[in-house]
């Protein structure tokens, strides 16, 4: 378990939409892999593709969201239970992907495939779309917001320069306010250094 502690703040997803096609006994399976961040995005894509492929027999899908990979769903869309959504989700899992939606559209070719045939076909179609996609690694980032008095600006900026977080916002009113984003594993060090700056106080999430 300790070996993976370094990679706990990274996750794999896809950089852009990708498509794969699989045919079996005249049935055509079109798989579309899409990068998504929210359930609303998932719903929006599903509406788009259900309209686009309105004449298809089935539009099945599975998605996985979040760096912890705990938010997921699989849908068979009228195929026998467990023969479509589950194998699609299985491919997402075996490639350790998240923030991804895979839709597989089936055009029926007149010959029934049986449950095992369907599982193989949906799995293969999803795999084709993943193979066509560019898989990228992203970091899990955290944000910290804090206030401090203007005379201590140089102290803060020295830390920002050395730790290299992304500056999300900064304002200089009565107090200076700044929001920084940095990789999760580097946040404790950044906070520890900021804590030592005189007058600085963190704006904790209310």
Image (cartoon, helix red, strand yellow):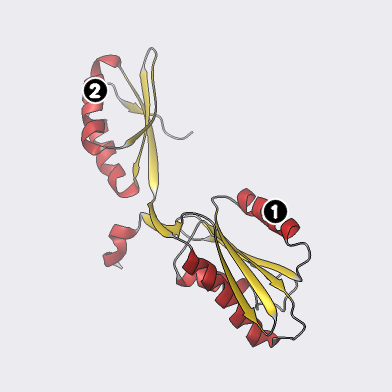
Answer above or below: position of 39 versus 160: below
Give the distance between the C-alpha atoms of the residues marked 2 and 1, in whole angstroms.
53 Å
Q: Residue at x 26, y 20 (%)?
A: 153
Disc 2 + disc 1, Cβ < 8 Å: no
Answer above or below: position of 77 versus 40: below
Q: Which residue is mark 2?
A: 198
Viewer-nearest of labels 2 and 1?
A: 1
Compared across the picture, whether 92 is left or right of 54 comes to: left
* Quarter residue 163 falls in: top left
Percent coordinates x, y for residue 47 in the rendering: 71, 54
From the viewer's side, name the closer residue of 116 and 4: 116
Percent coordinates x, y for residue 129 in the rendering: 54, 67
Residue 73, visible in the rendered structure: no
- Callout 1 secondary element: helix
Mark 2 surroundings within 10 Å by alpha-carbon count, few (fewer than 14), some (14 through 19), many (20 or more): few
Compared across the picture, whether 107 is left or right of 168 comes to: right
Q: Residue at x 24, y 42 (%)?
A: 189
Percent coordinates x, y for residue 8 in the rendering: 35, 58
From the viewer's side, name the closer residue of 11 and 53: 53
Compared across the picture, whether 153 is left or right of 141 comes to: left
Q: Residue at x 65, y 54 (%)?
A: 45
Residue 132, visible in the rendered structure: yes
- Callout 2 secondary element: loop
> How many numbered marks have been drawn onto this rendered protein structure?
2
Answer above or below: position of 174 versus 63: above
Mark 1 surroundings within 10 Å by alpha-carbon count, few (fewer than 14), some (14 through 19), many (20 or more): few
Answer above or below: position of 110 versus 11: below
Q: Which residue is mark 1?
A: 48
């Amino acid at each position: 378990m300790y070996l993976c502690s370094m990679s706990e703040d990274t996750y794999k997803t896809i950089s852009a939409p990708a498509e794969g096609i699989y045919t079996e006994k005249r049935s055509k399976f079109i798989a579309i892999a899409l990068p998504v961040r929210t359930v609303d995005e998932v719903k929006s894509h599903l509406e788009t593709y259900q309209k686009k492929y309105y004449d298809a027999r089935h539009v099945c899908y599975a998605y996985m969201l979040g760096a912890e990979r705990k938010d997921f769903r699989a849908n068979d869309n009228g195929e026998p239970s467990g023969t479509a959504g589950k194998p699609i989700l299985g491919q997402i899992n075996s490639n350790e992907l998240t923030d991804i939606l895979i839709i597989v559209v089936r055009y029926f070719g007149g010959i029934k495939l049986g449950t095992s045939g369907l599982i193989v076909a949906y799995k293969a179609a999803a795999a084709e779309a993943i193979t066509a996609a560019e898989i990228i690694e992203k970091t899990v980032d955290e944000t910290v917001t804090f206030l401090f008095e203007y005379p201590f600006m140089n102290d803060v900026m020295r830390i920002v320069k050395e730790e290299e977080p992304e500056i999300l916002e900064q304002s200089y009113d009565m107090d200076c306010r700044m929001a920084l984003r940095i990789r999760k594993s580097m946040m404790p060090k950044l906070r520890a250094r900021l804590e030592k700056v005189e007058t600085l106080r963190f704006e904790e999430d209310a």
